[in-house]
Image (cartoon, helix red, strand yellow):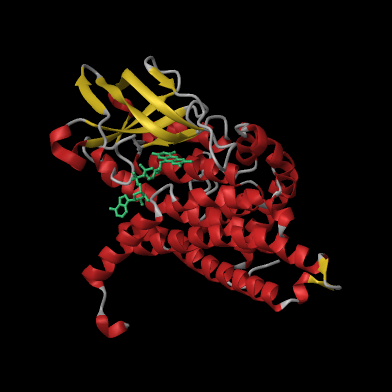
Amino acid sequence: MSLSFLTDDENAIRDAARSLIGREIAPHSTEYDQHGIFPRGNMEVLGEHGYLGMIVAPELGGSGASYLAQTLVVECLAEVDPATAVIFEVHNSLHIEALWRFGSSDQKDRWLPNLCRGRTIGAFALSESEAGSNAAALATRAMVVDGGYRLTGRKMFITGGGQADQYLVFATVNPDAGSKGITAFVVQKDAIGISFGPAMNKMGIRAATTAEVILDDVFVPESDRLGQEGQGYLMALYLLDGGRIGIAAQGLGIMAQALSRSLQYARERRQFGRTIGEFEGVQWRLANMATDLHAARLMTYEAARHREDGPAGRPLFAMAKLFSSEHAVRHAEDAIQIFGGYGYMTEFGVERLLRDAKVTEIYEGTSEIMRLVIASQLLKDYDLDNI
Ligand SMILES: Cc1cc2nc3c(=O)[nH]c(=O)nc-3n(C[C@H](O)[C@H](O)[C@H](O)COP(=O)(O)OP(=O)(O)OC[C@H]3O[C@@H](n4cnc5c(N)ncnc54)[C@H](O)[C@@H]3O)c2cc1C
């Protein structure tokens, strides 16, 4: 189905991505979820077909596409496999985009072609056990040494930890400077002194390995520092803005799946001599789901179209993530309710929607942090005459 608020080109990108994902990624999704298998092959397929690093210029291996195009692919992935959607999102919005926006030409040449082809996978290592929502409190230390830095610290909850080939690590060169000491580095998986905790057992997106990344006196050459010393925190915030659009899109995919599974079931399941879709109680739930999905799409696509606004668009990005993630969780519950007892059984795959949706309210900024971002902007700037 074409969406009237997308251009013909955008609808074509969506159709092509959906068809590839349906053919190549959907068939493995349940097995990878059940066994927690990291879907490296999915990333290779996406790379071979030009879906990685979509915003990067073609001469560096990308497709020169819009941010919205990339956002549409996240949504299509999340319809069938939210775990691959988040790996894709971290790889593109948090890792590739960092190099594309802030890397030197040497760094772009060295890393982007392989990342865009899916030959290497990138991760984003900001969070620590004592620095989650308050990432500026991170303690990972970067000591300046001859020719570069030595990094020591532990990064918590890293998507792709131990599976990704390179890590964008945030560490401080000067703990007394607070957020102004934070600096970004690209660290290779085979660097001496880097190790990984075991894959953490978790509720949903089970194929998207989450692990601790442990840095013990890891040497990083100066040529692998991204940007200047002290620019890392602002860089992280900039990247998370885009990441939040991606998580909003992940919510859209889950909502779309919840709605389509629910509609199909409501047409088929019979009780009291009628299909359950004939009962008003079910109809209202379906109508609300369709309405919320439409609203969430408008918000998310608008946010994607405004990605180039940078920090000025931050409240818009936060609103899209907040609305989409909270509705994804609600719709996953609605779908389970519509399926009744069958919705609660693993075999039907509807309970998975809820397991996979919940994390969208947590990572890349919790719902509470999204509300803080929106409210602080409102209190600063909102023009009362425009209410
Ligand atoms: C599956 C998964 C994958 C992840 N992947 C990555 C990754 O790849 N890279 C990475 O760097 N991080 C990653 N994270 C970390 C994630 O970004 C953090 O979990 C998130 O930012 C919240 O931090 P926290 O878990 O420490 O919670 P806390 O910050 O301790 O928050 C706990 C609770 O307190 C609330 N709270 C905190 N501060 C405030 C406040 N000021 N006002 C109101 N409420 C507040 C929070 O909203 C939350 O409800 C991942 C997390 C998960 C679960």
The percent position of residue 64, horizontal first and vertical second, equals: 51, 50
Quadrant of residue 130 within the rendered picture: top left
Q: Name the outermost residue toward the right.
A: 273
Q: Is residue 272 above or below residue 94?
A: below
Quadrant showing the C terminus: bottom left
The percent position of residue 205, horizontal first and vertical second, equals: 57, 42
- Name the residue at 36% across, 31% down: 155
- Name the residue at 38% across, 49% down: 240
Q: Name the outermost residue toward the left.
A: 176
Instruction: Tell me: 335 left or right of 105.
Output: right
The percent position of residue 36, horizontal first and vertical second, equals: 61, 33
Q: Is residue 109 visible?
A: yes
The percent position of residue 107, horizontal first and vertical second, equals: 38, 32
Quadrant showing the N terminus: bottom right
Instruction: Tell me: 172 left or right of 36.
Output: left
- Name the residue at 41% across, 31% down: 167
Ligand 1 falls in quadrant: top left
Q: Is residue 341 above or below residue 26?
A: below
134, 98: nearer the viewer: 134
Q: Is residue 350 above or below residue 163?
A: below
Quadrant of residue 196 within the rendered picture: top left
Instruction: Tell me: 301 left or right of 258.
Output: left
Q: Name the outermost residue toward the front.
A: 272
107, 19: nearer the viewer: 19
Q: Name the outermost residue toward the top.
A: 192
192, 247: nearer the viewer: 247
Q: Is residue 12 visible?
A: no
So how many labels did they put on this image?
Answer: 0
